[in-house]
Amino acid sequence: MNKPTPPLNLKLSLKLSHEHWLILGLASTVLVILALVTALTYNIGWSKLASATLIFFLSYPLIWLAWRCYHFWRQAIMQLTTYTQVIREGETNLRFKAQHQDNLLAELQQEISALAIGNAHKVQQNQTLENVLSHILDSWPIPVCLFDENNQLSYRNIAMKEKIQQPMLIGADAEDLGFVMNNGNLSHSQFDQQWQCQSISYLFQQKQCHIFSALDISQPLHQQQSVTQQNLIRVLAHELRNSLTPMASMADTLLCNDSFNEDQVRLVLSRIRQRSNRLLSFIEQYSQLSHLPMPKSSWFDLKEVLDEAKAMITEPCTITFQGNRQCFADIQQMAQILINIFKNAQEACDKEHCEIDVNLFYPQESSQGPYKTEQVIEITDNGPGFGNLDNALTPFYTTKSHGSGIGLSLCAEITRNHGGKFNIENTDNGAKITMSLPVK
């Protein structure tokens, strides 16, 4: 199917530019004036020779005026066009010739000049900022380098140059410098595990570039290892002391008797063996890892674990239990939590007799049936409460004259490993600890 042909005047309007329309208008004006003069001379009876002579001498000034008008507008617009092109190229030395205030292009010139001045200020600020950043990065001890969209080096500081130990020329390919691009991230074999490397991609002028930096973490790693080892030793010593001290006390009590009661001896030895086995198992798991062993949760009778933990407390202490006896957690780690809490409450109590209340309940039920999804253990005492709630769970922080400050922080860590929450607060009657543990 043939497309309809547009009218002739529409074709001309599409082809002619503004400059061509100006030329056409000026030429038409000259021709109209000459035609009017010809008609006038014909009407007044001039001869053909006189009319031709008048038209000849009159056409020269008319053509000259038309050309001057065209040249005036074209020159002013060309100057503005050239001026804007020079500004776009970043040249700031060129200045546009000032126009008369009555000139229609004077206001346009002022706007372009204002843009040029603002652009020059921005360029100067960017150059100043680049110089400052370059100076900072050059004095920075952290190796840093930048690559453009073609993975060619565009900047490297002194630390990077010294670390790579090879010429790093601007424009060199990343692969030639030993860098490897993997999934959009740069890496270098010169930076081993003692270095923390970071590769970032960013857009600059709609082009994706890369920045690579490396931080020497050998000294912090060494310090962290030393701190971890010291903390591990202190934690193990704390747990050993809490368990071995009451066992030694029970053994001394038996040895001080002139005669032995078989039932009492069997009970003491049973407690010592039971606690020793669990403590040995706890230490064995702990020694294999740099952190607490992951809990192995199962159902058990919390009342029985409470009786065992109570036996580890040497000073008089009344422990009352109420609620559901079935608990879902790691039995060894739960026993360790209870021993630490009871011992901490007994040591902090300023009354003649320490009283501790333990309550286990299930606050929620599953929407799909009567299945327990969460269990809550609340432990309260009649002591003075926590002296500093903000730091009570901070490892190795303690307000007591003796102790290492590990007990409560270890309890909180074990609870978090179970996927639960460990909260402490002060009440009117003493301290309160709430443990929320999930039931799976």
Image (spheres, helix red, strand yellow):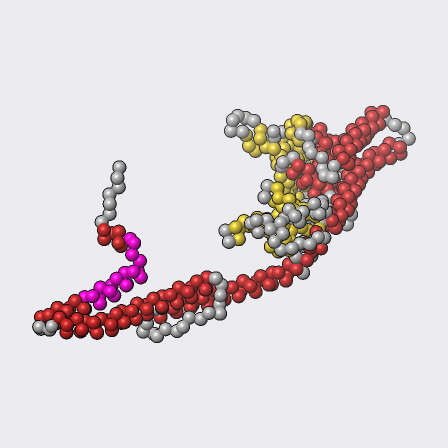
Residue lying at 51% horizontally and 53% vertically, measured from the top left: 205
From this viewpoint, is residue 311 visible?
no
- Return the x and y of residue 61 as percentages of the image width and height: 24, 73
Name the residue rendered at 74%, 49% in the picture: 218
Instruction: Tell which of 133 and 7 is nearer to you.
Output: 7
Quarter containing the C terminus: top right
Residue furthest right as drawn: 258
Query: Residue 16: where, in percent of width, then height?
Result: 29, 56
Magenta stretch: give its range: 14-33
Asked whether, in this view, residue 409 is left or right of residue 252, the answer is left
Instruction: Report the number of numbered marks.
Output: 0
The residue located at (31%, 58%) in the rendering is 17
Task: Out of 420 and 365, give the one closest to the viewer.
Answer: 420
Q: Tell whether position 26 is magenta.
A: yes
Q: Is residue 418 left or right of residue 317?
A: left
- Up/down of 91 relative to 409, above or below: below
Which residue occupies 76% across, 48% down? Answer: 222
- At which x and y percent is residue 367? 51, 29
87 vs 134, left or right, is left
| Residue 158, quarter of the rendered image | bottom right
Task: Check the image and report above or below for 321 versus 152.
Answer: above
Quadrant location, the N terminus = top left
In screen coordinates, is 20 left or right of 346? Answer: left
* The stretch drawn in magenta includes residue 300: no
Q: Quadrant of residue 82?
A: bottom left
